[in-house]
Image (tube, helix red, strand yellow):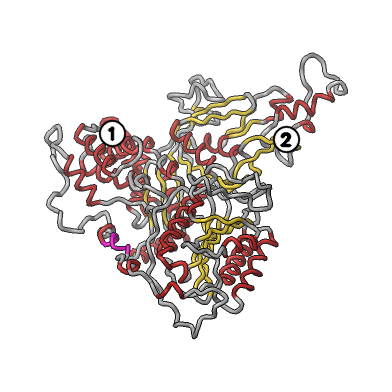
């Protein structure tokens, strides 16, 4: 067995270490979600914590790690009589991203159940993690239904497995730790809320600290045993402190004054539901026990808020996680009162209003951050001369009136609920919520012979396959003779996530009449829709003389929204270059991820004025998508009383459909999105979003 990196040898990452230790003291806190960039010791810290946990005593021979002092009465291996018990180290079980549902919750042996009538159950990772740590690396890349199962088990302390009339329940209480890189996509807010605490980690920018990290890591790699021996005394001391805090925890008093501060803080930050209040109370209690105190103080409430609220106060997916510490201090001071026992009425150093001297973080990021929005002075001046900078094709621009000056980015209008745009047909890509797909989970649409290991059994089809052969098999009595060749696996249809690639026209004509603000609002709404449907997104922009990939395909719609807000406008309209750049992005992505289908959303007024033969080249570029059957939707941004209908013509050349900005709204009945291929006039692919 490899020697784990010592927990006490970790450099920095104070919040991460504290959150892990609090969960070790009180697993009821609800686990930790660790957000941060690659290479920040997330996995190392979790593995190091497992070596600190006290040894557990288990019933001998029990596959579900029952406690001999209080065995689970519903244990599948039970009932357990008082008898032999074994001691072992607490386990750390890792859940891989590609794990199946059967691997997570366990699997029934369907063949033995049918042929022998035996209820044979093979425990999964949830059973292995009972009374230990369940570690999920890249939890944001895990399929949603697996995350739901995982968090349900963590909340209830038990796992339920239902398979064709056979039911199994077993205890599953564990310390849940998930790690994720936000650049690869976010978790849904509903799932974020199920993690008790969250911490943001990043590599230190202090040279001395980075040097120490490298020095210790190299020493560990050269001799793990010798390196661990240097920290053995510190590890033993920390392990004893965890045991002492666990013993003290039931004696910690959470008085009414602290409860009022907790409730007031959650109300002030407008978090949804009551889970935040409960988690803060448990965290503050664990903090007091960790400090060796029997009373929860204001400083415990403050630290609990910093750990339990940042991921819960997000009002929409594009809000960055975080907490306004000035507002937190004001709330705690307003609702703070004298302690019941008169001891330390206010442990917070109150005379500190003037400074960024808070040891918990470098300065106040919320102060200057409010000035990120540029003053609206630029867009308020009507670009009267810029309206003619994108002339119709039949009028050659005279002497190129000097490149149009780049206009300052404008803010997007308020996002709205966008209607559902889908890719036609049935795919087999990553699980999501946009287009139809053949999946392992969803509604049953038929049955087939299993290929390899049997998945979800289609019982009716299996019986139908076995019935005609009963006489030949010499059936006696009322029993049904089932052989392996009779087994049928259910085929299911669900939804898949797509690659939604936005090609956004940022030319001068789009900026005329301040139209770009509405365009950004529409694209932001589609990005929000892509976030909710678990899509990958990419962003191509074109203006002036060419096109660029503003954002390569990614699962982080936050990054796409940020690039969109900063998008400058101005210049001519190189429509052909934009389409060709989008075609190249889709070609490369198809090689990387062949199963994920693409939806191209072209946001433009349809004008083509940039480059040689702009109209002819744009038509030929659009024909590439039509020839390859790529699903496309053109968002017609043309405005004004006189409309040329160029975007609708572009949509026909692309082989897709066109919608106006108004028709993108899900509550707009006139905006009917039809199937992206030729369909009868009375049919539609539109479904409720």
Q: Position of residue 130 (x, y in %)?
A: 48, 34
Pointer 2 local density, CA inside 10 Å: few below 14, some 14–19, many at least 20: some
Q: Which residue is mark 2?
A: 447
Name the residue rendered at 43%, 24% in the picture: 69
Outermost residue toward the front?
641
> Label 1 vs label 2: CA separation?
57 Å
Name the residue rendered at 50%, 25% in the picture: 84
Q: Position of residue 398 (x, y in %)?
A: 50, 84
Q: Which mark is residue 248?
A: 1
Question: In this orientation, which residue lies closer to the viewer: 399 or 619?
Answer: 399
Q: Which mark is residue 394?
A: none
Outermost residue toward the right?
472
Outermost residue toward the top?
477
Question: In this orientation, which residue lies closer to the viewer: 103 or 232?
Answer: 103
SS at mark 1 in the image: helix
Q: Position of residue 455 (x, y in %)?
A: 67, 37
Left or right: 143 as drawn, with respect to 481: left
Of labels 1 and 2, earlier in sequence is: 1
Name the front one of labels 1 and 2.
2
Q: Which residues are magenta?
A: 368-373
- Tell me: residue 1, above or below residue 149: below
Name the residue rendered at 55%, 31% in the picture: 63
């Amino acid at each position: 067995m490899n020697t784990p990196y010592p927990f006490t040898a970790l450099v920095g990452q104070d919040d991460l270490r504290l959150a892990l230790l609090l969960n070790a003291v009180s697993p009821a806190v609800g686990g930790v979600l660790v957000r941060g960039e690659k290479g920040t010791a997330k996995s190392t810290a979790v593995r190091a914590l497992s070596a600190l946990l006290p040894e557990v005593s288990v019933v001998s021979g029990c596959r579900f790690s029952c406690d001999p002092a209080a065995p689970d009465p519903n244990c599948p291996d039970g009932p357990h009589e008082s008898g032999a018990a074994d001691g072992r180290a607490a386990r750390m079980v890792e859940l891989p991203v590609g794990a199946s549902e059967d691997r997570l919750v366990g699997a029934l042996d369907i063949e033995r159940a049918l042929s022998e009538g035996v209820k044979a159950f093979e425990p999964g990772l949830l059973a292995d993690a009972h009374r230990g740590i369940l570690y999920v690396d890249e939890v944001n890349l895990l399929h949603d239904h697996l995350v739901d199962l995982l968090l349900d088990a963590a909340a209830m302390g038990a796992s339920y497995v239902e398979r064709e009339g056979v039911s199994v329940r077993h205890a599953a209480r564990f310390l849940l730790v998930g790690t994720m890189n936000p650049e690869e996509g976010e978790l849904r807010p509903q799932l974020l809320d199920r993690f008790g605490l969250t911490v943001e980690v990043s590599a230190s920018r202090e040279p001395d600290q980075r040097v120490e990290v490298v020095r210790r890591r190299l020493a560990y790699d050269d001799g793990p045993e010798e390196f661990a021996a240097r920290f053995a005394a510190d590890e033993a001391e920390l392990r004893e402190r965890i045991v002492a805090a666990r013993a003290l925890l039931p004696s910690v008093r959470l008085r009414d004054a602290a409860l009022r501060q907790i409730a007031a803080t959650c109300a002030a930050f407008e978090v949804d539901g009551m889970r935040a209040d409960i988690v803060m109370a448990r965290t503050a209690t664990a903090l007091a026990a960790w400090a060796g105190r029997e009373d929860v103080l204001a400083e415990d409430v403050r630290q609990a808020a910093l750990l339990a609220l940042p991921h819960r106060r997000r009002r929409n997916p594009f809000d960055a996680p975080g907490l306004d510490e000035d507002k937190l201090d004001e709330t705690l001071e307003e609702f703070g009162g004298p302690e019941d026992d008169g001891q330390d009425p206010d442990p917070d150093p109150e005379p500190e209003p003037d400074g960024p001297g808070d040891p918990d973080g470098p300065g106040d990021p919320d102060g200057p951050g409010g000035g990120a929005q540029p003053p609206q002075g630029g867009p308020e001046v009507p670009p009267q001369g810029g309206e003619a900078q994108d002339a119709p094709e039949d009028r050659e621009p005279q002497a190129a009136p000097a490149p149009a000056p780049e206009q300052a980015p404008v803010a997007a209008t308020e996002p709205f609920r966008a209607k559902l745009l889908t890719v036609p047909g049935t795919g087999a890509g990553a699980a999501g919520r946009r287009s139809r797909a053949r999946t392992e989970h969803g509604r049953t649409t038929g049955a087939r012979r299993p290929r390899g290991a049997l998945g979800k059994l289609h019982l009716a089809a299996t019986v139908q396959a076995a019935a005609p052969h009963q006489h030949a098999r010499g059936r006696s009595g009322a029993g049904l003779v089932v052989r392996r060749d009779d087994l049928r696996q259910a085929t299911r249809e669900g939804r898949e996530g797509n690659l939604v690639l936005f090609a956004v026209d940022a030319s001068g004509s789009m900026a005329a009449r301040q139209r770009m603000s509405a365009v950004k609002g529409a694209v932001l709404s589609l990005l929000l829709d892509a976030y909710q449907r678990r899509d990958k997104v990419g962003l191509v922009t074109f203006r002036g003389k060419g096109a660029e990939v503003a954002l390569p395909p990614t699962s982080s719609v936050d990054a796409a929204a940020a690039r969109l807000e900063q998008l400058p406008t101005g210049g001519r309209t190189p429509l052909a270059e934009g389409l060709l750049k989008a075609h190249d992005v889709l070609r490369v992505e198809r090689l990387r991820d062949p199963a994920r289908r693409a939806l191209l959303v072209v946001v433009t007024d349809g004008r083509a004025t940039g480059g040689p033969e702009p109209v002819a080249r744009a038509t030929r570029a659009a024909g590439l998508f039509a020839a390859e059957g790529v699903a496309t939707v053109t968002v017609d941004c043309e405005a004004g009383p006189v409309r040329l209908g160029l975007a609708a013509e572009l949509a026909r050349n692309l082989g897709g459909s066109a919608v106006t900005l108004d028709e993108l709204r899900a509550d707009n009945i006139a905006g009917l999105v039809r199937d992206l291929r030729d369909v009868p006039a009375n049919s539609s692919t539109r479904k409720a979003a």
